């Protein structure tokens, strides 16, 4: 099984790579456009701003890599900011266009909750599509923005932080996103990462 980690200057690559090593997988890190085998699994990690992340992806033509991989049916797993990039757009730093793999947009917690922002620390992610992925647990979050899929059937996990928000999404085919960090979530995170790779 080939696993590719996309390096666009905004990801926590070492922690993700270490988690994969712990599970017995080796990963190749790609930082520029290339054709990807149709059976390869692609992981899109991310920390930072949506606008800057999309700018970096476009400059390196990694958005084209991801779009072509999606057309070829490759499994793509977005983590934290990587999940948000799967959406149509984000309101962070003005409206920015995303990859558009899942219909919906990204908005901020500001003026919607009375809790501290960013949402940082351990919180529960509750599985909402148990026929597809029957797993809930506590995971580690760090984010100020969240995804709003247009179709509720695209929600894999839901978490409450003053409001309920989608903490896991899918297009019910080859695209998956998780808002939390499995690579920082100890046993629960490793278990979920293994499930996403093998499902």
Image: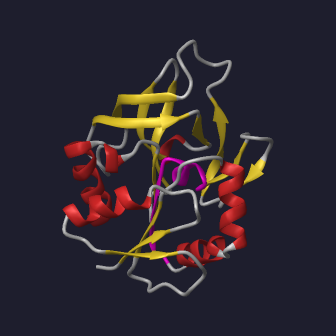
Task: Identify the residue shown where x is 38% and y is 60%.
Answer: 14
Percent position (x, y) of residue 45? Answer: 48, 57
- Looking at the picture, does residue 133 appear above or below residue 56? above
Image quarter of residue 95: top right
Residue placed most toward the observer, 128 or 98: 98
Task: Identify the residue shown where x is 66% and y is 23%.
Answer: 110
Percent position (x, y) of residue 48? Answer: 60, 47
Magenta segment includes 158: no
Task: Identify the residue shown where x is 60% and y is 81%.
Answer: 33
Percent position (x, y) of residue 166? Answer: 49, 37
Q: How many marks?
A: 0
Magenta segment includes 77: yes
Residue placed most toward the observer, 74 or 5: 5
Task: Identify the residue shown where x is 66% and y is 35%.
Answer: 107
Image quarter of residue 184: top left
- Looking at the picture, does residue 133 appear above or below residue 57? above
Residue extending farthest right: 94
> Is residue 96 found left or right of 80 in the rendered image?
right
**Which corner quadrant holds the C terminus?**
bottom left
**Which corner quadrant holds the N terminus?**
bottom left
Percent position (x, y) of residue 78? Answer: 48, 56
Span of residues in magenta: 73-86
Q: Is residue 37 visible?
A: yes
């Amino acid at each position: 099984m080939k696993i590719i980690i996309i390096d666009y200057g905004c990801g926590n690559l070492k922690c993700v790579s270490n988690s994969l090593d712990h599970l017995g997988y080796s990963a190749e890190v790609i930082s520029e456009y290339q054709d990807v085998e149709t059976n390869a699994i692609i992981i899109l990690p991310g920390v930072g701003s949506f606008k800057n992340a999309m700018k970096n992806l476009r400059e390196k033509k990694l958005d084209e890599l991801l779009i072509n991989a999606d057309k070829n049916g490759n499994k793509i797993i977005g983590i934290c900011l990587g999940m948000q990039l799967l959406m149509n757009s984000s309101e962070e730093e003005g409206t920015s266009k995303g990859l558009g793999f899942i219909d919906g947009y990204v908005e901020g917690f500001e003026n919607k909750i009375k809790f501290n922002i960013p949402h940082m620390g351990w919180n529960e992610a509750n599985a909402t599509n148990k026929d597809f992925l029957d797993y809930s647990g506590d995971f580690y979050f760090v984010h100020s923005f969240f995804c709003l899929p247009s179709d509720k059937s695209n929600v894999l996990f839901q978490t409450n932080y003053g409001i309920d928000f989608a903490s896991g999404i899918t297009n019910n085919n080859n695209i998956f996103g998780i808002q939390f960090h499995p690579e920082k979530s100890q046993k629960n995170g490793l278990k979920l990462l293994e499930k996403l790779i093998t499902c």
